[in-house]
Image: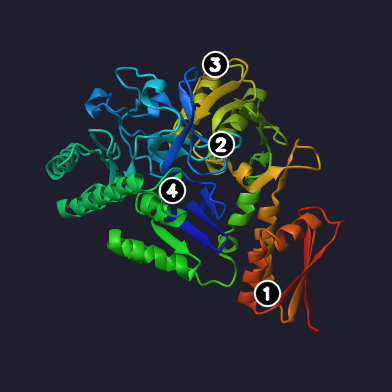
Amino acid sequence: MYKELIINDSEHETRVALLEDGAIVELYIDRSDESNIAGNIYNGRVQRVLPGMQAAFVDIGINQAAFIYVGDVTGDQPSNDFEQIFLSSDAAHENGLDTDAVDSVSTYSKRESRIEELITEGKEILVQVAKSPIGSKGARITTHISLPGRFLVLMPTVDHIGISRRIEDETERNRLKEIIVDLRDKNYGYIVRTAAEGIQKDKLEKEMLFLINLWKNIQNKFQTVSAPSLLHKELTVILRAVRDLLTDEADKVIVDSPSGYQAVLSFLEEFMPSLKDSVELYNGLEPIFDAYNLEVDISRALKKKVWLKSGGYIVIEHTEALVAIDVNTGRYVGKHNFEETILKTNLEAVKEIAYQIRLRNLGGIIIIDFIDMERKTNREKVYNALKEVLAKDKSKTHVLPLSELGLIQMTRKRIRKALSRLLCEPCFYCEGDGYLISKQSICYNIYREILREAQDMTGKKFTLRVNPDVAERLHGEENNIISSLERKLGKQIVIYPNPRFHVEEFDIFEIHSN
C-alpha cells in the first residue's frame, strides 16, 4: 500500500492529509486559534480540589480550566512507590505519537493515595496536556510527562524501558533494550519507537541526550516562571506528521509552501537526513488539495448520509452522548434472496463505517444499527469483519458482539475534536438542530477560491459579496486573510455585505476599471 502525506500550509491554517493508495484516510488541521494543545507542558496552579470526584481543576493559562484525575498525579514519594507506568497506544496517540506501543497503562499508585493528599489549592504543578479541550470539556492533564523524539520517548517520572510492539524480532528487541540500559545514567523511563529498529547506538545516544537536555530546560523554566505559564510547546502539525508518520505510515511528503518545505528539510537534516529525498515541494497551479481531489472527500465527510457503491447508504448522527450510525439498503434490491441482500449491504457498510470513523475522527460511544439478520452465522461474519477493519485504526477501539437487534456497541478513544466539530458550528438558523460550515471555515474557503480565480483574472481589484456576519469577520478577526491576499495578488479586495446571502454563500467579481 502506497502512502503519502499531503500538506497544505498557509498563514492561517495547516492541513495534513494521510493518503493510502490515493484515498484520504486521516486529516489533521491546525489553526492559529491554538485549540490543539495536546503535548504542551505548563506550570499550572491548582484552583480547586474535588475529593468526591478524586480530581482537581488546574489553571494552565487558557480560557478553560484543565482537569486532572488522582491517577494522573505523581506524589512526592520516590517513583518506585508507584506502579510502573507504561505508555499505551492511547497515551502515545494523545501525545502526538504513532501507536507503536507497548504495554498497558495503569497510573494509580499502589498506595491508592487520595488527591487531597497529593495536591492542595494554590499549589503550582508541572503538567502536560494529554487531551485538548473538546466542546465543554476542559483539557485533561497529567503530571506523568512524556517527551517524544524520533526513536525514543523519554518518561522522566517512571523507571521503565519498553520496546514497540511493532518491532517483532526478539534479537532486535533485546539489542535495543541493552543499548538503552547501557546508555541511561538516571532511572528515567524510555519507550523505544518503531523507527529505532536497526538504528545504531550513537544515534540513540544523541537523541537520548537531546531529550534529557530538553527535560532539564523544562524543569529550569518551572523553577523560574510563575503559574500559569507555557513551559514547552509541542511541534507544529507538519513536523509532528513528519516525525511520526514518515517511513512508518507514509512513503512520501508533498508540501505546497516553500516555508513549510524548508522547515521539513531542516527538521530532517537534524534528525533523519536519509529521508530528505522523500520530501517534495508542490509547484502545481491548482491548490494541492484540489490536485489530489481531497476537498470533495472532506466535504463528503461532513455529510450525514454516505452512499455505498451497491446503492445502500449509512447515516451518521452526532448526539450529546454518543454517535449513532444507521445502515440502510437504499436503492440496492439484491439478486437472489432477502437475507443475502442484507448481508452484502452490512458487509459493504462495515468497510465504509470503519473508514468514516477514522477520517471523521469519531470517538466515545458509537452505536451501529446494522440491518437485522436472521442467521447467527451472518451476524458473526459482520462482527468479525468490523473487528478486522478496525484493527488498522491507531486509536484504541473496543467492540461488543452484534446483538439480536442488529446493534453493535463500541467505543473508540477520543483524542481530539471530531472533524465536524472542528470545521462546523451549531446552526443558528435551526437553533442548533443541525450544523453549518463555520464562518471561520467560510473565510478560509473564500481565501482559497480567490487564489483559484486569480489565475485567470486580469482585473485591478476584486469585489467580494458575502453574508453580513462573514463580512464582519473578514473585517475583524480574519482581516489578515484579506490583507494577505492583497499583498500576494497585488490587487484590492472590496467586501460588500449582502443580507440576502445565506451565511455559506459568497460571490467574487473582478473589476477592470479604476
Front: mark 4 or 1:
4
Where residue 454 is drawn, which disc sits there? 1
Is residue 2 visible in the rendered structure shown here? no
Question: Could you say which is closer to the camera, residue 95 or residue 216?
Answer: 216
> In x, y percent, where is residue 217?
30, 50
Compute the Cα span from label 1 to label 2: 37 Å
Front: mark 4 or 3:
4
Where residue 376 is drawn, which disc sits there? 3
**Residue furthest bottom in the image:** 514
Q: Which of marks 4 and 3 is nearer the N terminus?
A: 4
Compute the Cα span from label 4 to label 3: 55 Å
Horizontal side, residue 180 vs residue 106: left or right: left
Front: mark 3 or 2:
2
Q: Which of marks 3 and 1 is nearer the N terminus?
A: 3
Q: What residue type is labelled 3?
A: Lys
Q: Is mark 2 on a helix, strand or loop?
A: loop
Reading the image, the residue beneath label 4 is 230
Question: Could you say which is closer to the camera, residue 192 or residue 212?
Answer: 212
Quadrant in the picture for residue 464: bottom right
Front: mark 2 or 4:
4
Q: Which of marks 4 and 1 is nearer the N terminus?
A: 4
